[in-house]
Amino acid sequence: MPLSAPEQLALRDFVKAGGTALLFCDNNTDYQAASRSFTAVFGLSVTGTLAFTGGSTIVNRLNRVVTGPAGTATGFDYLNPGWFSNIGRAVDIAVLDAPGMVGNHAPSVAALLPGALGRGSGAVVLFSDSDILLPTSDYGITSTNDNILILNSLALQSGRQAALAAPADAEAFRAELFVNAKMDIYRAGGYEDGSDGIAPVVYSFPARAGRVLEFMSVGGDWTCTTIGVPPFSPDGTTAPGCNPLAVFGSVGPFSGYANSDFSSAMVGMFLENSLPSSPPPAFRFYLTDNSMGGIPTDFRSLSPLIGQVFFIGDGLTGTGTGAIQIFRVPPTATHLYLGFIGSCNPSDLSPSCYSDNGGTLAAVFHLYEQ
């Protein structure tokens, strides 16, 4: 039986208050209405009636649903599953290809990570097959991989538990944000840039002079496309296949951005409570090729302006190693946005081609007065 409207509101409020929900859909036509009644609460759509047994491919290996206290899952095993035709702001965890499926690489496991529904909100993990809950004697499927995914999902901390709040003096803040690969940095502050991306994740704080930002860890991996390009680290990649590698022009009130010899690193932007009246100049960053000038990615400190897109990567002077980099916060800033740069065409660098990105990064940072 589908959830009633009051039940849908109760489910949403439970998660927004810090609760964790595991939702199991079923492709049986008798249960599709019920499945859709709870996926709709969180902006997802489920479809498909596959008569197929097999395993999905994990596309987000370092996500805490995949790798956690119960171990590391190497797939999602199913028996006659459906799939998610739209995952909204969720993160794809596993994708499937199967006979009779319309399209390729459709999500079969998806998650709204802690904090995705607002500060302090819990997680929602959605599975496209409920047969994984049944024993084989009752036409179900028993799988070590599925058990790991379920147990890791249950162990997820809510945003309320995971965010390490400010101390009593309210001058220092420590928090964790989850950066979906589909997050377009140029949608910061509610700006509409016309891309197929989603808004970047944001952390808000009171304006104050003399603050600095440091990243204690940025974990996970992502890719600019789930087809043919392997995942890479928060520092991005030098491999071909992802744009841009050249100057990215200003977008509305925001600066451009340029890489000389790499692409696809996590980036950030500071904003005030309103959008800038005009775009600031663009940064250029490089790994080793300084022929076009710019700033090396192993900088020790950086002072971005309001509305200026800047390289963050993993927040260290090296990839996975080195000193913690310092980002000096503009004194009037009240918001930190984290996301990515994406473009379909290297000769027409406008925000685009976010919808086929895959993966999520988990960024833990410290904002304090120096």
Image (tube, helix red, strand yellow):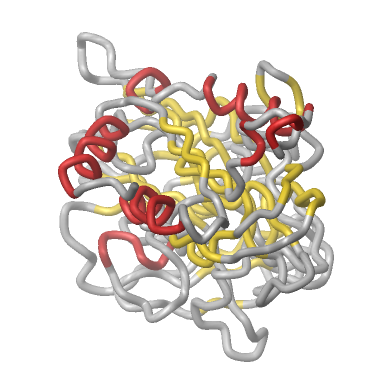
Screen quadrant of the C terminus: top left
Res 223 quadrant in image: bottom right
- Picture coordinates of residue 2 (x, y %)? 32, 50
Res 203 quadrant in image: top left
Identify the residue at horizontal 68%, vertical 63% (top origin). Answer: 50
Q: How many marks?
A: 0
Compared with residue 369, is residue 278 higher up or lower down, i.e. above or below? below
Compared with residue 56, is residue 101 higher up or lower down, i.e. above or below? below
- Left or right of residue 318, residue 368 in this image: left
Q: Is residue 38 visible?
A: yes
Identify the residue at horizontal 75%, vertical 39% (top origin). Answer: 319
- Left or right of residue 190, residue 326 in this image: right
Q: Is residue 290 visible?
A: no
Front one among 286 and 2: 2
Identify the residue at horizontal 64%, vertical 40% (top origin). Answer: 131
Res 358 quadrant in image: bottom right
Identify the residue at horizontal 53%, vertical 78% (top origin). Answer: 352
Front one among 230 and 90: 90
Compared with residue 67, is residue 223 higher up or lower down, i.e. above or below? below
Residue furthest to the front in view is 137
- Picture coordinates of residue 193 (x, y %)? 36, 77
Residue furthest to the top in view is 168
- Picture coordinates of residue 114 (x, y %)? 42, 33
- Left or right of residue 90, residue 159 in this image: left
Front one among 97 and 340: 97
- Picture coordinates of residue 135 (x, y %)? 70, 28
